[in-house]
């Protein structure tokens, strides 16, 4: 039998990520799970010169993480509600790597991620954080397609148009 004691929900603070929260919070209620809501700050520090160059990037990263935590808290309050029981977490780095590492370090039983539904050339060029996590994670990953994207059906004409084959 599967017990989901810890569930990791990822968010990029978009409306699409709410689909993942909907599924994960439902599982959380069923299993009385601890729910982590992770937002990864894809942060590249500015270049500094002079004596303080080692300390300043650290201070900028911390300031960026504090601002991101404020945005995450506001997002949860406005979109989900303060009583959702989510544990907000901010990390900096490569999103797929950080998601995978956080899940492994915390002993998470399931990762729930929303997809953006990119296809064709846009998907090839931009890549997909969800796809990278699914391919490389040792923790089970559930991907959720948001409702507006479920209603879009691609056909051969769309793909040919996207790849400029016509």
Image (cartoon, grey):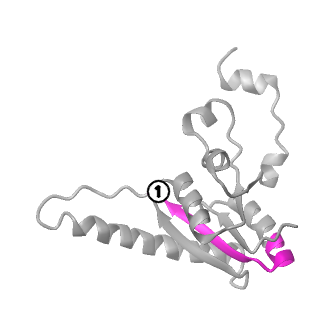
Image quarter of residue 156: top right
Q: Position of residue 53 (x, y in %)?
A: 19, 63
- For the residue pair 39 and 148, the one nearer the viewer reads as 39
In the rendered view of the protein, which quadrant contains the C terminus? top right
Query: In the rendered view, would you say 33 is above or below 92?
Result: below
Please report the residue visible at 55 percent of the width from the left and 60 percent of the height from the top. 101
For the image shown, how many numbered marks are present on the structure?
1
Q: Residue furthest bottom?
A: 83
In the rendered view of the protein, which quadrant contains the N terminus? bottom right
Please check the rendered image and state whether residue 41 is part of the magenta-colored stretch, yes or no.
yes
Query: In the rendered view, would you say 132 is above or below 66?
Result: above
Residue 116 lies left or right of residue 2; in this view the side is left
Please check the rendered image and state whether residue 35 is part of the magenta-colored stretch, yes or no.
yes
Q: Residue furthest top?
A: 166
Image quarter of residue 104: bottom right
Q: Position of residue 26 (x, y in %)?
A: 83, 71
Magenta-colored span: 26-42
Q: Position of residue 28 (x, y in %)?
A: 79, 74
Image quarter of residue 159: top right
Q: Position of residue 100 (x, y in %)?
A: 58, 57
Residue beneath disc 1: 42
At mark 1, the secondary structure is loop
């Amino acid at each position: 039998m599967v017990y989901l004691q810890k569930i990791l929900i990822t968010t990029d603070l978009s409306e699409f990520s709410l689909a993942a929260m909907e599924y994960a919070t439902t599982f959380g209620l069923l299993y009385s799970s601890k729910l982590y809501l992770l937002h990864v700050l894809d942060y590249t520090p500015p270049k500094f010169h002079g004596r303080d160059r080692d300390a300043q990037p650290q201070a900028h990263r911390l300031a960026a993480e504090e601002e991101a935590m404020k945005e995450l808290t506001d997002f949860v309050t406005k979109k989900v509600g303060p009583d959702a029981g989510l544990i907000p977490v901010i990390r900096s780095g490569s999103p797929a790597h950080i998601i995978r590492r956080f899940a492994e370090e915390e002993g998470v039983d399931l990762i729930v991620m929303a997809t953006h539904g990119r296809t064709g050339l846009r998907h090839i060029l931009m890549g997909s954080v969800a796809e990278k996590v699914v391919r490389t994670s040792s923790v089970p990953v559930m991907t959720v397609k948001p409702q507006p994207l479920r209603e879009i059906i691609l056909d051969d004409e769309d793909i040919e148009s996207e790849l400029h084959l016509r």
